[in-house]
Every structure is written in structure tokens, then in C-alpha cells.
């Protein structure tokens, strides 16, 4: 992960997460949770509150120790594709880089492998990998309790993501919407036919 101007990371910071167990250690308030916030933000988190801020602009380095606030926050997350990513045209790639940028004037950018894209594209790529926003790759404080206390319907969403069927549920929703549209068109056609015959 590559962070620039995000929360307490004013300077470009590169972090490697090798296979196995990684630990982020440091004194209180040094920025450990900001590392997790950076991953979650890059993967598409839309709620400032989930990132422990009031507005999304709070993720931009706000100045400290005589340093001026940054004009832009950028996080790049590169992850290995072990075959979990099935969305085209990324399915065959061994590495995928997701980029998110936010400028102080509110402009934002998303990229996949350096190519500008929509948030929706990032969500599609991450779907069923467990890495998506609110998926189970990041288990923060209180999340285990939240899982246990969740309503069955909420718990089911996690299970569905792990089982890899979120993508199909979404495709079904899109298809049902199309069928609805086609039914409406047919009804309109029948009306016209009745009028002209
Ligand atoms: P703890 O161990 O207490 O949970 P932590 O190591 O997880 O702490 P974080 O909560 O990640 O620490 O980081 C908090 C620090 O990040 C604070 O010093 C805060 O001032 C700084 N910080 C948060 N947002 C910004 C920002 N936009 N600009 C500059 N600094 C920021």
C-alpha cells in the first residue's frame, strides 16, 4: 500500500504486507488505525463516520508540526489476484492496483491499474473476493461482537459474500429490472396495437 496525504501520513509512505501475520505496533495516537482506514477508504468506503471522521475531507492530511495541510489524499492498494477476481478485463491479471484520490475542493478519482474508472467498477472487481467495502477482510474492534449480535439477514450477507454469490445476486437484480422494463414496453405495444387495429 502506498499512502500520500492521507490522515497522519503527510509524506509518501509505502507499506508491505507480506504473507502471513502482520502487526502494526506503536504508541497511542501514532496512526495505527489510520493504516486500516487507508485500506478501507481505497477500497471504496463512502461513510466518513466509518473512517472516524465527520466529513470525507477529514481524510486529507490537515497539517501538523508546522506543516501545511495537503491538497490531496491518495491511497494505492496493490493486491495479488489468486483467481478470486472474476470481473473482466481484470480476471487474468496477477496483480490489481486500486487507487483513490480526493482533492480538497471535493473532486475525487478512482483508478484500477492506473486507468480512471468509476467506484462501481472497483466494487465489481472486489465483489465476492471478501475485500469489498464492509466485507469481512477487515475485522476491526467490535466487529466480532457485531457479527454475533447481527440480525440473521445481516449475517447472511457476510455468508453470501464468503460463498461467492454476491455477484450473481446483483446480476439477478439487474436482469429482473430489465425484465420489468421489457414487460412495460410490451404493455405499451399492446396498447398501440389495440389503438391502430
Ligand atoms: P490508538 O492506539 O490510540 O488507537 P492509533 O495509533 O490507532 O491510536 P490513529 O487513531 O490511527 O492512532 O491516529 C490518530 C492520529 O491521526 C491523531 O494524532 C490525529 O491527529 C491524526 N490524524 C487523523 N486525521 C488526520 C488528518 N486529517 N491530518 C493529520 N493528522 C490526522
Image (cartoon, rainbow, N blue to C red):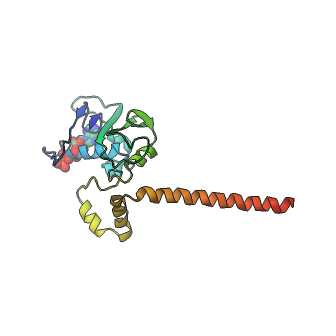
- Is 11 positioned to the left or the right of 92 in the image? left
Name the foreground residue: 141 vs 136: 136
Q: Which residue: 87% across, 61% down?
A: 197
Name the foreground residue: 46 vs 130: 130
Q: Which residue: 42% across, 33% down?
A: 115
Q: At which x and y percent is residue 145? A: 25, 65
Q: Which residue: 41% across, 58% down?
A: 166
Reply above or below: 105 against 148.
Answer: above
Q: At which x and y percent is residue 185? A: 70, 57
- Is 117 positioned to the left or the right of 48 in the image? right
As drawn, which residue projects farthest toward the bottom? 152
Reply above or below: 158 against 15.
Answer: below
Q: At which x and y percent is residue 175? A: 55, 57
| Quarter of the figure with residue 55 | top left
Name the foreground residue: 95 vs 121: 95
| Quarter of the figure with residue 107 | top left
* Camera sees residue 35: yes
Q: At which x and y percent is residue 110? A: 41, 38
Q: Image quadrant of ligand 1?
A: top left
- Is 175 positioned to the left or the right of 102 in the image? right
As drawn, which residue projects farthest toward the top? 67
* Camera sees residue 107: no
Q: Quadrant of the N terminus?
A: top left
Amino acid at each position: 500500500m502506498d499512502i500520500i496525504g492521507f490522515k497522519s501520513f503527510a509524506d509518501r509512505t509505502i507499506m508491505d504486507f507480506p504473507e502471513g501475520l502482520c502487526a502494526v505496533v506503536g504508541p497511542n495516537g501514532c496512526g495505527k488505525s489510520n493504516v486500516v482506514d487507508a485500506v478501507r477508504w481505497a477500497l471504496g468506503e463512502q461513510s466518513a463516520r466509518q473512517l472516524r471522521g465527520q466529513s470525507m475531507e477529514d481524510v486529507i492530511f490537515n497539517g501538523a508540526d508546522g506543516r501545511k495541510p495537503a491538497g490531496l489524499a491518495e491511497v494505492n492498494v496493490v493486491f495479488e489476484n489468486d483467481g478470486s477476481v472474476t470481473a473482466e478485463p481484470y480476471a487474468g491479471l496477477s496483480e490489481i492496483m486500486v487507487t483513490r484520490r480526493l482533492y480538497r475542493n471535493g473532486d475525487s478519482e478512482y483508478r484500477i491499474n492506473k486507468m480512471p474508472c468509476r467506484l462501481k467498477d472497483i466494487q465489481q472487481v472486489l465483489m465476492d473476493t471478501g475485500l469489498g467495502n464492509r466485507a469481512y477482510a477487515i475485522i476491526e474492534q467490535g466487529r466480532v461482537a457485531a457479527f454475533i449480535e447481527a440480525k440473521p439477514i445481516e449475517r447472511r450477507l457476510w455468508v453470501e459474500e464468503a460463498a461467492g454469490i454476491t455477484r450473481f445476486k446483483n446480476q439477478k437484480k439487474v436482469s429482473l429490472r430489465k425484465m420489468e422494463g421489457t414487460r412495460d414496453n410490451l404493455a405499451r405495444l399492446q396498447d398501440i396495437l389495440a389503438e391502430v387495429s
